[in-house]
């Protein structure tokens, strides 16, 4: 599959209304994609809607949109609106998200996540194709819905996937997988489960500094926040890191947050977070492509001036 070069947006520290010049620069540097995320800051679609108007070339993807937090019909409307704004330039990224985001923050039961993703893919394909949907899926029912926006070209649908069940679903029902919080070597483990000819989008956390203390301080917080979430803990258990992560997990469960941070091994930081000079960061991102990621989407955690230097180092041109 043709290699794509993406960047996670919004750019750290840049308000949305100042992104026009960033999108122009990304396209001029040869980047092909921008990928948004959705947790507790910006929603996944607004920044991409701006990119659709401000850049005629960049492909627009979400990594990822939770399948629980929008109703099926509203999700279809939102996707179709973006597709109409940027025909042929949209990739849909769906995922389960986590109980924290779905249940604690949005008050929605986090039930049967694998089935919900499967059902959402099937519904979206039917709705975007212009069919009248009147169907009882396993996890929701849609009665008599027909999308009022004509979609000329079906966008690829990718699945945020961690363990084998979701990775296989991404290959069987979707057009590929979106992966994150893993090392380049881990990419080699997950890609075969998705299957041949499928897009693999790797979200990569990048800390462009040679201050190792600063890297460790921030990376420990990020790893503790993510890898104690049950779905990510199970993912790294499956990858074979249970023994390495046990002290952190035990401290976190005991309510010892400081102890959990201290228990994050330096080795794990080096495996999961790309850091160093802009040139070293570019080499680190490239290792994911060499391991089988067809699209790289680094999230650069730095002030805008530093981000610009990293983008220059990462640039395909």
Image (cartoon, helix red, strand yellow):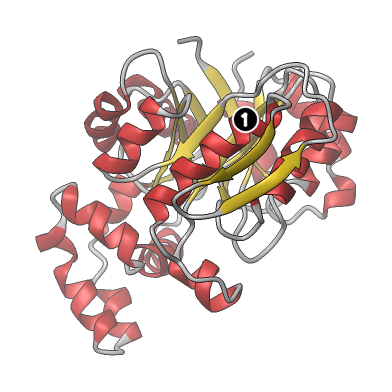
Compared across the picture, whether 63 is left or right of 76 comes to left
Residue lying at 44% horizontally and 41% vertically, measured from the top left: 118
Tag 1, which secondary structure?
helix
Q: Which residue lies furthest to the bottom in this view?
A: 255
Residue lying at 26% horizontally and 67% vertically, measured from the top left: 264
> Of 58 and 81, which appears nearest the observer?
81
Residue lying at 51% horizontally and 73% vertically, measured from the top left: 103
Quadrant of the image containing the N terminus? top left
Q: Residue furthest top?
A: 2
> Of 161 and 40, which appears nearest the observer?
161
Instruction: Write down the residue under mark 1.
Output: 126
Compared across the picture, whether 111 is left or right of 317 comes to left
Residue 231 point in image, percent of width and height = 33, 59
> Of 95 and 9, which appears nearest the observer?
95
Residue lying at 25% horizontally and 24% vertically, measured from the top left: 192
Q: In which quarter of the image is residue 202?
A: top left
Residue 233 point in image, percent of width and height = 27, 62
Residue 117 point in image, percent of width and height = 47, 46
- For residue 220, say whether it is visible: yes
Mark 1 Cα shell of 10 Å, populated few (<14), some (14-19), many (≥20): some
Above or below, 91 relative to 18: above
- For residue 301, say whether it is visible: no
Quadrant of the image containing the C terminus? top right
In this rendering, the count of numbered labels is 1
Compared across the picture, whether 229 is left or right of 313 comes to left
Q: Quadrant of residue 9?
A: top right
Residue 139 point in image, percent of width and height = 47, 55
């Amino acid at each position: 599959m043709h290699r794509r070069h993406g960047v996670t947006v919004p750019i750290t520290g840049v308000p949305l209304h100042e992104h026009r010049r960033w999108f122009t620069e990304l396209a001029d540097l040869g980047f092909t994609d921008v990928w948004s995320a959705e947790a507790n800051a910006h929603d996944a679609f607004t920044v991409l809607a701006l990119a659709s108007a401000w850049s005629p070339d960049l492909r627009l993807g979400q990594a990822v949109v939770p399948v629980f937090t929008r109703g099926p019909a509203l999700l279809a409307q939102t996707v179709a609106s973006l597709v109409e704004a940027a025909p042929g330039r949209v990739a849909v990224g769906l995922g389960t998200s986590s109980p924290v985001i779905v249940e604690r923050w949005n008050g929605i039961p986090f039930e049967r996540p694998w089935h919900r993703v499967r059902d959402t893919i099937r519904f979206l394909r039917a709705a975007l194709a212009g069919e009248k949907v009147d169907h009882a899926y396993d996890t929701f029912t849609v009665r008599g819905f027909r999308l009022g926006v004509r979609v000329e070209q079906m966008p690829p649908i990718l699945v945020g996937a961690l363990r084998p069940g979701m990775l296989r679903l991404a290959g069987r029902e979707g057009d590929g997988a979106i992966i994150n919080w893993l090392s380049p070597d881990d990419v080699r483990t997950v890609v075969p489960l998705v299957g041949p000819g499928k897009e693999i989008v790797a979200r990569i956390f990048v800390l462009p500094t040679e201050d190792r203390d600063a890297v460790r301080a921030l990376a420990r917080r990020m790893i503790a926040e993510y890898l104690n979430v049950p779905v990510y803990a199970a993912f790294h258990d499956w990858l074979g890191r249970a023994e390495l992560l046990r002290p952190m997990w035990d401290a976190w469960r005991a309510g010892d947050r400081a102890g959990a941070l201290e228990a994050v091994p330096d080795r794990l930081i080096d495996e999961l977070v790309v850091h160093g000079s802009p040139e070293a960061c570019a080499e680190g991102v490239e290792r994911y492509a060499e391991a089988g990621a067809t699209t790289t989407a680094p999230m650069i955690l730095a002030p805008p001036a530093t981000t610009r230097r990293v983008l220059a180092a990462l640039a395909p041109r």
